[in-house]
Amino acid sequence: IQLTQSPSTLSASVGERVTITCRASQSLSTWVAWYQQKPGKAPQLLIYKASSLENGVSSRFSGSGSGTEFTLTISSLQPDDFATYYCQQYNSHLYSFGPGTKLELK
Amino acid sequence: EVQLVESGGRVVKPGGSLRVSCGAAGFTFNTFGMNWVRQAPGKGLEWVASISSDSKYIYLSDSVKGRFTISRDNAKNSLYLQMSSLRAEDTALYYCARERGLGEIDYWGQGTLVTVSS
C-alpha cells in the first residue's frame, strides 16, 4: 500500500493552524497512525486509529479521516512542533509509512 | 520504563551478512509484537519487518524478503534481525520498535547504524 503526503514541506509561523494530508492507494478504514520525528531522535507516536490521541500528547494535535484520505492538524503551532511528520498505515500486515512532511518555521 | 536498546550495527561489505539485536526492558516482552523500521541517512522511515509475540506470524517488506529474517527470544527479552546479501541501499539506522497491538508503534529504540560499503 502506497502512501503520499502533502505538502512535502510546510512553512508556518508560531500560533498558526496547519494541516497535513496523507492519501493511500487503497482503503485503510481508520488504520492510520501519525508520528513526529525531530532531528537525531526516534519518532514519537501522536495519533493512532486515525483520530485517537496518544496519551501524553498535546490536544493541539488532532487526526481525522477514513478510507483513503487522512489529515493531521496542529491547532496552534508551538516552537517545539517544528519537526517532520509521518503517517503510517497498518491496514495491511505489510506496514508502510508516508514520505514525510517537514514543518519549518517561516 | 520501557527501554529498547539496539546493538550490532557496523560497516559491512556489499554481499555480506550481519545480525543486529534489540534488548527490551520495562514491559512484558512476550506479550507484544515487535518491528524493525529503518531510516537511510537524510531519508524517511521504511518499515522492514514484524513478528508477533509468539513468533507465529512474521512479515517482511518486499525490499528485504528473501535476504532478511526477523526472530525473537522471549526468554532473553531480545529481538533480532539477520541480514544477508547486503546492498548499499540497506545502509540505514535500524530502529527496534514495539507494536501496541493493532499496528501502531508506541515505543522506539534509538537505533543502530548499518553501513554497507566496500
Image (cartoon, coloured by chain):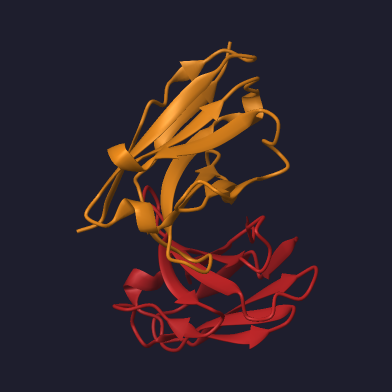
Chain colours: A red, B orange
| Camera-nearest residue between B69 and A97 | B69
Question: In this view of the protein, which residue sits in the foreground, A57 or B34?
Answer: B34
Compared with A92, B84 (above or below) is above
**Percent position (x, y) of residue A34?**
52, 71
Question: From the image, which quarter does the N terminus of chain A lie in?
Answer: bottom right
Is residue A74 visible in the rendered structure shown here?
yes
Rendered image quadrant of residue B62 = top right
Residue A78 falls left or right of residue B105: left
Give left or right: position of A78 versus B36. left
Please state the horizontal and vertical placement of residue A73, each as a whole percent of the image. 52, 84
Please say if B66 is above or below A30.
Answer: above
Q: Is residue A104 visible?
A: no
Q: Is residue A9 above or below residue B17?
A: below
* Residue A82 horizontal/vertical position (percent): 42, 68
**Would you say A93 lies left or right of A58 here?**
right
List x then y, in percent, for residue A50.
56, 81
Quarter-wise, where is residue B40 in the image?
top right
Relative side of A85 to A61, left or right: right
Q: What residue is shown at x 38% (from left), y 25% (from top)?
A: B8
B50 to A30, vertically: above or below = above
Q: Residue at x 41, y 81 (%)?
A: A77
Identify the residue at horizontal 53%, vertical 43% (top origin): B38
What residue is at 80 percent from the left and 71 percent from the top? A26
**Most foreground residue, A48 or A10:** A48
Camera-nearest residue between A61 and B26: B26
